[in-house]
Image: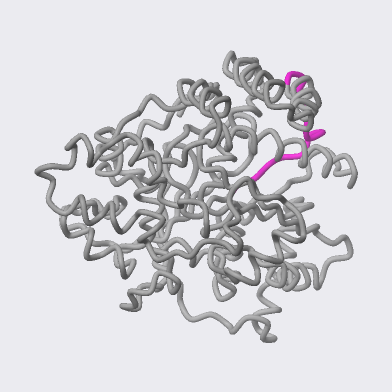
Amino acid sequence: MPVENNFQHDELSRKNPGDRLNVAELADVAPPESPAWIEAMAACGSSLSRAGVAAVVFLHGSLHGTDVFGMQRLDEAGGLKRGYSRGVSGLDALLAAMREESNGIPLLPGGLKPPLLDDDATKNLLDHQVGDAGNFTGENIRTFSQAINKRLTQPIACIRFVWSSEHHHLGRASAAVSLLAELHRLCKDRGFARGSRILIQAHGQAGLVLAFVSNLLCPTPITGRTKLFEILTEYADQTTQPELTAMIKLIEPLLATGTLLNGTVLDIVTYGTPVRYGWDPSGIGNLLHIVNHRKLRADGKSWLAKMELPQITMELPIAWGGDYVQELAVAGSDSVPGTESARAANKRVWEMVEPYDGFERWLECARRAVRFPSEGRCLLVDYKDSTGSTNPRDHYYGHAVYTRQHALLFNTTQIVRAFYEA
């Protein structure tokens, strides 16, 4: 996507990404927390420090209780009711495998639903119920922090944010505002020097929140920023959300003057983020998209996923081709906001950021099988998480492995190589 992307949707290009793309496999690595693992992580920490990284931020939501495939919107669009799926072999079975009530992913205790709070109670609940499946646990972050800081006199801050997990345009836009306000406070409170860096690692749809952030951080005036803030402010006023209004008032003038992060550079890594919103590279530093992927295509286009019906309905339960949430939670899918005012505001944001609507357009986007956006570096990784198990909790359809403890060292090493080693 171009500089001054102005919230355009990604073009969903199927072209060979060329030298933007690297491929890797999760090879045998030192056992987590072993002496060799700690030493390797400490070496990564030294590389991060030399590059000026002052903080590593982990951003995620929940796989449980959040309609991770976005089937609520697809069913509202009426794919089955209106007969769109007729004649498409295997599609009905695929939709059944994606629905929240039949995909095998449990709900959260007590029926907890988005918006999730970024508080200790929510984090502890996720750690207890989900473990490290699509969840940056508090224990893993503490271990990560201790290891990378082992040799450093100036420790790198390691911080965990849980975003609201509202899988719709309004929710992601609001989360982008909240995240920018938190990053501003982080830079201010910790006194980060100009030229220091924050490394953000975002799992799943948290990456879409950061796509919004990249557009908001555009250093030149863009019409979309003003329009988006108007939509969110009106919605906040209608629904009595003074916190959202206050955050917009805080960050809007700072974005206009380019002083929100006080000269700190934002480096971004996404894990298994569906390709939807376009990215604007002009206001951020490094950008890397990591996707769990295995080559199944016979046409030589190894950088694309395989989306062939009805075969995909046989592959999906064992995550044979990699991350199916990343592949299928594309434009047209989403959860549906719970109130009329939220639905109206969501529609206004939708009209800004995503020209795709309806069941047939979702199917068209899914069949493009695009693994990564048009901006940033790309890393396709075989994480070796397809073991033949049909229990979704073993793999969460290929979407959980990025945050597993055994992948921490591998991921950190790949990030250091991509970003901080010339």
Along the line of sight, the residue nearer the viewer: 279 or 376:
279
Seen at 74% across and 46% down, the residue is: 197
Q: Position of residue 25 (x, y in %)?
A: 42, 69
Along the line of sight, the residue nearer the viewer: 215 or 70:
70
Instruction: Tell how many labels.
Output: 0
Seen at 31% across and 59% down, the residue is: 97
Seen at 17% across and 37% down, the residue is: 83
Left/right placement of residue 298 relative to residue 349 reads: left
Left/right placement of residue 229 relative to residue 380 reads: right
Left/right placement of residue 83 relative to residue 180 reads: left
Task: Judge whether residue 267 is colored magenta.
Answer: yes
The quarter of the displayed image where residue 351 is located:
top left
The quarter of the displayed image where residue 367 is located:
top left
Q: Which residues are magenta?
A: 256-268
The quarter of the displayed image where residue 408 is located:
bottom right
Left/right placement of residue 264 relative to residue 116 reads: right
Along the line of sight, the residue nearer the viewer: 214 or 325:
325
Which colour style is shown? one colour
The residue furthest left is 87
Seen at 64% across and 33% down, the residue is: 174
Q: Position of residue 220 (x, y in %)?
A: 65, 18
Q: Where 173 sits versus 122, above or below? A: above
User: On the rendered image, what quadrant is the N terminus found in?
Assistant: top left
Q: Position of residue 151 (x, y in %)?
A: 81, 71
Q: Position of residue 290 (x, y in %)?
A: 48, 55
Task: Judge whether residue 186 is colored magenta.
Answer: no
